[in-house]
Image (spheres, helix red, strand yellow):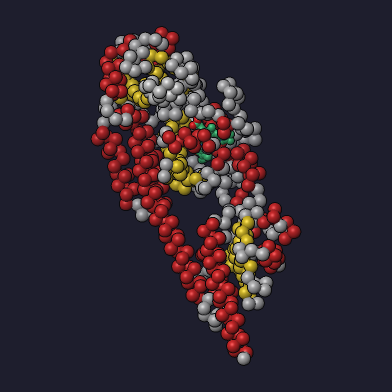
Amino acid sequence: LPPGTPIDLSNCEREPIHVPGSIQPRGVLLTVDEPGQVVQQASRNLADLIGVPWESALGRSLAEVLGVPAADAVARSASAFGDLRERNPIELTLDVGGQPVPVDAILHRVALRAAGDATPDLPAVTTLVVELEPARGPRPFSFPNTYQAVRGTVGELNRASSLQELYDITARAVQSLTGFDRVMVYRYDADYNGEVVAEAKVDGLNSFLGLHYPASDIPAQARALYEKNWIRLISDVDYAPAPIEPTAHPATGEPLDLTYSTLRSVSPIHCEYLGNMGVRASMSISLLRDDRLWGLIACHHYAGTHAPPFATRAAAEFLGSTLSLRLVDRASEEEVHRALRVRSTLAWLTAATLDEDRPLTDTLLGSPSLLDLIPGEGVSVCLQGAAGSRGAPLPEGIAAAVAAWAAGLGDDVVATDALPALAPQLGAPVDVACGVLVLPLLEGQYLLWHRGETVQQIDWGGDPDNKAIAEREGDEIRLSPRKSFERWRETVRGRSEAWTPQEIAEATELRTHLLEALYARQRSIVRAAE
Ligand code: BLA
């Protein structure tokens, strides 16, 4: 987007959120060149924290701006071995008008030009970004006191025996660590729609547990940024951004990349959304699986602004990365369990069909049933002249009509998540049979699974019928879970949850066994007649 383009709902996917040109004013930002430590950029609110106006900081040495001891501490940390960020925060005490002011310095480097860029023998050029926040919480920040805060939880996470337990432990631990009013574990599905799978909150708030939110609430470029930088805090949703001066870095003529900055000014669209939910402060921590965003730990504060100190945020981020590691083992373990469960159901069902004294329809609709193999709102079966169903029933005649339509297509397996659009003449009810998976068999015989419309089946956080919607949402509001739900609803209207390739493969396998069973029974009948 060209600079200065107003951001609205139509272009927010393209908002360049990593280069906002400003910061949140809970702290101040300086960039300095290395090794000279000359200040090249400063945030306009510099004087609020350190008493030096931003204009007079530009072009001066860090020692002149922060004092010699602070500049030395920054230089020492910046020249030490390894990843700069792992040493954050650096505890400094500044002299502001004769008063000692404790601050946390948070350092990282930004590449301004890659090595060899344009001219091959040029070295890489970086700038040192120095962010200062007023110190809060216990000092000194030391390894023992942060480690203490998280080691109990890490032990619990290691002992947890299910995914749900991992989520619950994490939500509770992050809430007690950070003091947010509500902490949620938010998990994405394959399309990046999210579900609140765990929640820890103060009494008196309505619960968001089990609610779903559409993918557009966290656009793609934000998700990409969150795969790189794993934590972000908006300590006051109503803040006025503090611009970085000059906007263009003198070495590049470009605005500074704030991907790894802790004070990065966030999208105004998102602040509007949060405000409309009644949220005053928000923090989120990335959960990753195989380096891809899997979900977030999302924290809300309603009572007022909220700014846990950097060390606490780092401890919460550490818990998020521990959970991420555990998710990988647990999720693959649960996938293996699911696959085994399905295999054993399939084996049981195919073995049971060999019992020729029992009608096939009874066997497949008994326990376990076809719904244990492939989940849906219901399943209908018509085999050897016997029709039956399990789960939510379809209206009279619909199953047979859908099966005849599917048989007419000539495929072994017919799967769709949008039957009403594909074959409106069938009159399939969208609330239970928006999607169907059909196995047409010989002579009008069939198996048919059906699923309802996703919008109706799932508890959407923005659905106006949902009691859990934040009370502040009114009609005049432009941006909120309810509004994004309404927009999003139009895009998924008339669709059910999709049939996965695995489910289709399982159905195909079952079909082969069933055809064998049908032939075998046919032969027995013929033999008996002879
Ligand atoms: C970012 N949107 C986010 C973030 C969350 C959500 C958690 C990360 C930033 C943070 O920590 O606050 C969404 N928050 C939620 C949801 C819940 C919640 C779903 O608590 C449910 C309980 N957002 C919109 C629309 C747009 C949009 C319509 O709803 C754009 C048109 C944009 N959301 C948007 C942007 C960001 C964002 C641009 C990035 C903010 C940033 O990091 O700069």
> Viewer-proximal residue, 7 or 405?
405
Relative side of 420 to 331, left or right: right
Task: Return the residue nearer the eye: 194 or 307.
Answer: 194
Residue 169 vs residue 289, the one in the foreground: 289
User: What residue lies at 53% left-to-right and 37% top-to-bottom?
Assistant: 220
Where residue 249 appears, as percent x and y from the top left, is: 45, 17
Quarter-of-image position of residue 112: top left
| Residue 527 in view | yes
Where in the figure is residue 211, as x and y percent of width and height? 53, 46
Q: Residue drawn 48% across and 68% down?
A: 345
- Residue 194: % across, % down: 52, 44
Pick the quarter of the image with the N terminus: top right
Residue at (60% x, 44% y) in the render: 463
Q: Is residue 505 left or right of residue 71?
A: right
| Residue 201 vertical placement versus 165 (above, below) | above
Q: Position of residue 255 (x, y in %)?
A: 48, 20
For the view shown, which residue lies furthest in the front direction? Answer: 120
